[in-house]
Amino acid sequence: MSRILLLHTGGTIGMTKTENGYQPDGEYFRQAVFHMDSLKKADMPEWDFMETETLLDSSRMKVKDWNMIGSVIAEHYKDYDGFVILHGTDTMAYTASALSFMLKGLNKPVILTGSQIPLCETRSDGRDNLITSMMIAGEGKVREVCIYFGGLLLRGNRATKYSAEGMQAFVSPNWPPLATAGISIQYNESAFLQHRSEKFELRPFADIPIGVLKVFPGIRFELFESVIAGRLKGVVLETFGAGNIPDDEGLLPLLKKAEENGTVLTVCSQCVQATVDMSTYEAGSALRKAGAVTGHDLTTEAAVAKLYYLFSVYNDAGSVKFNMERDIRGELTSRIEL
Ligand code: ASP
């Protein structure tokens, strides 16, 4: 019989209504989980329940909260066969990406889940999300950081929140689902992460200044000087299509300054389904020439988490750039010669 740890961090799943709107309610959620008959059935793993000191709406998650979730997993890594993290949907894809980098050598399931409708409401999707996540964590077939939501098991660092309305809140635009849960749970083993035999270790993040800039027609880059060439160590540029950017004359001097400052500019796409190739169009090649790195098909969430991770591990921009373009945890697929 496998044993898993449930860690409640906040989010809609455990919220109840207050006069100011839904808020995390630890007491309610704990009682609800302990009284849920399905969780006591023979086909469920054994489980223990923990909650973080402060339950958060996930829009309030910070780097220290990612580190804290990572440290709970690391502290109890040997005691459990898998982990289910109950989390708000708003930043679930960021936390899943962060954990995927932070938990080096992970060889057990870490499944993040939550719900669109609180468990206290009649039509809540939280019940299935919780039960199925626990089953997946208990089965132990998939041994990486995932998001389970609305019938799909997705690699955490490939997922992005797609809907604030539907029960299918997440998609994984550039990588197939790792499993689909219909009448039975069908695993897609060919999509699983290939494990290297590495020792498990926690690599907490330093709280590095990181930024994200979405370009738009008419952008005057000089107005964003403090973002591109200021004090940020890493910037994710959300560009058009395959990595194209408007030809504003203010851009090149800024790129040069960013390069001199050691700021790592990572080029991602505004298209959900895309791979960046800055050599495809003349409109993208200036970025490459100026030393920006390609984010390939990284989601913005994964690019942000990866910048935090790499700057926590390496002191020099060169090593960050080199590793940014390479696959570390199944977060990107490179279709171009580097
Ligand atoms: N604001 C909530 C959160 O992210 C939304 C949710 O959980 O669906 O915590």
Image (tube, rainbow, N blue to C red):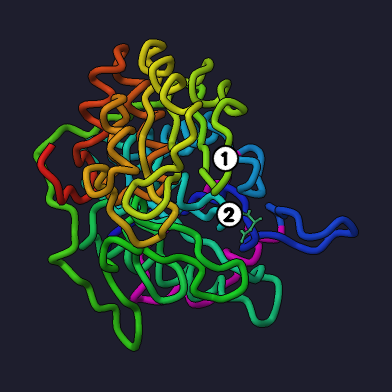
The part of the image, by quadrant, that contains residue 55 is top right
Relative to 113, residue 166 above or below: below
List the residue tagged with mark 1.
219
Q: Which of the image's four quarters has the C terminus?
A: top left
Q: Amino acid at mark 1?
A: Ile
Residue lying at 54% horizontally and 35% vertically, measured from the top left: 65
Which tag, 1 or 2, sits closer to the chain's start? 2
Question: Magenta stretch?
Answer: 28-52
Query: Left or right: where does residue 62 sit relative to residue 310?
Result: right
Q: Amino acid at mark 2?
A: Asp
Mark 1 and mark 2 residues within 8 Å of each other at the beta carbon: no
Query: Left or right: where does residue 225 sit relative to residue 48?
Result: right
Relative to 158, residue 148 above or below: below
The part of the image, by quadrant, that contains residue 245 is top left
Ligand 1 placement by image quarter: bottom right
Give me the C-alpha separation between circle 1 and circle 2: 27 Å
Badge 1: few (under 14), some or many (20 or more) residues near its Cα, within 10 Å? some
List the residue tagged with mark 2.
90
